[in-house]
Image (cartoon, rainbow, N blue to C red):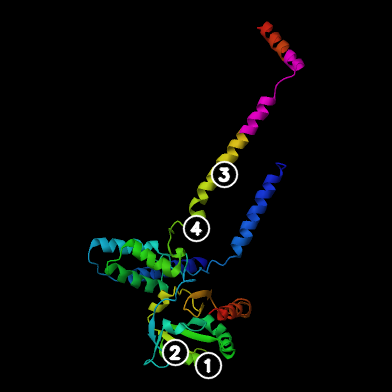
Amino acid sequence: MNRHMIPLVVFAALLLLFWVGLGLNPKIIPSPLIGKEAPKFELPELHDPQKVVNNEMLKGQVTLFNVFASWCVSCRAEHHHLLKLQRQGFHLIGLNYKDEKRDALLYLRQLGGDPYEMIAYDHKGDIGIEWGVYGTPETFVVDKKGIVRYKHTGPLYREVIENELIPLIRELEQES
Amino acid sequence: MRAVIGIFMAMSLLLSSSVYALKAGVPLEFKDEEQEELYNDMLHELRCTVCQNQSIAGSNASLADDLRGNLYKMVKEGADEEEIKGFMVDRYGDFVLYRPNFNSSTYLLWIGPFLLLLLGVIVLRLNVRSRNKINNKSELTSEESEMLESYLDSKKEKK
């Protein structure tokens, strides 16, 4: 190799490094929960505090576990996607994170409905910590055995839903 | 006008930082000094995952507040440093530690600087060696050395 090529090669390597490195979003922290069993929890249901929602209810079918709050602005942006997913027959369970019950109910009414089969009401945010929640909204995919398989931090948008979420759910539904 | 705005901003900054101090300075009770020390150490070891360049000691985010509460509870219950770090890493990943554990995803972070240093030393040695070669090559042809010798001789005679 010509020794004059060396700076060029180094430059190209740096270019590649920066290209990849700067393309990553530092706000996205990979979840250590993936591949592990969903954290144990038991919380009152938002609409009906007599009922409980717990991690056993994530089992049996592929579930979208979505963390939201009425104070969370970007949750509003993904809400219509959640409603659509529910209409398509997907199974959604919500975690209402550090919220007031009244605000949460109003939020669901204002945004066109409740896409969740049930909503765990995490008023203090303790269960949020169990799930490693740091930036609402967050969406987890839990498989039939209750293992966390995927996490998306931030609002869902069409590309993520069509290219990642739905194909993964379809695949997990095939598993016994 | 600018100066006024500057002073105003500095003032508000000062004020707000004292508010933080007050908020963080709610007196907490510990069983002994050891626990208190552990709590304070951990405050600075754990990263706030929302505001990523702050430890949970300095962050005003509500998550940091919750994590401080959690930490306090764990310390009170007698958890040691390993248990606390394990708890946080299990939930938020290695990123939550300012000094992450050495494992497959962090080894480059730890040994990277030393690798670069090693690379630098190798490059330097290669450079020096090739320069030495060039210096050694500069031998004179027989004609040139004759010229040089006669020149030196003439100098000597003059003395």
Question: Does the residue at mark 4 contact the one at mark 1 (Cβ under 8 Å)?
Answer: no
* Residue of label 4: B104
For the residue pair B148 and B90, the one nearer the viewer reads as B90
Q: Earlier in the sequence, mark 2 or mark 1?
A: 2
For the residue pair B117 and A50, the one nearer the viewer reads as A50
Relative image position of residue A63 (x, y in whole percent): 51, 82
Is B147 situated left or right of B14 in this image? right
The amino acid marked with disc number 4 is Ser
Are dots 4 and 3 on a single chain? yes
Circle 4 SS class: loop
Are dots 3 and 2 on a single chain? no
- Numbered circle sitting on residue B119: 3
Circle 3 marks a residue in which chain?
A: B
* Residue of label 1: A113
Circle 2 marks a residue in which chain?
A: A
Q: Are there few (<14), some (14-19), or many (20+) residues within 10 Å of tag 4?
A: few
Q: Given the current orientation, which residue lies at the most extreme front position?
A: A176
- Numbered circle sitting on residue A142: none
Residue shown at the point (37%, 70%) measured from the top left: B20
Disc 3 to disc 2, C-alpha distance? 59 Å
Circle 1 marks a residue in which chain?
A: A
- Occupied quadrant, residue A157: bottom right
User: Over which residues does the magenta segment extend?
Assistant: B129-147
Residue shown at the point (45%, 87%) measured from the top left: A119
Nearer mark to the viewer, of 3 and 2: 3
Circle 4 marks a residue in which chain?
A: B
Is A135 situated left or right of B124 in this image? left
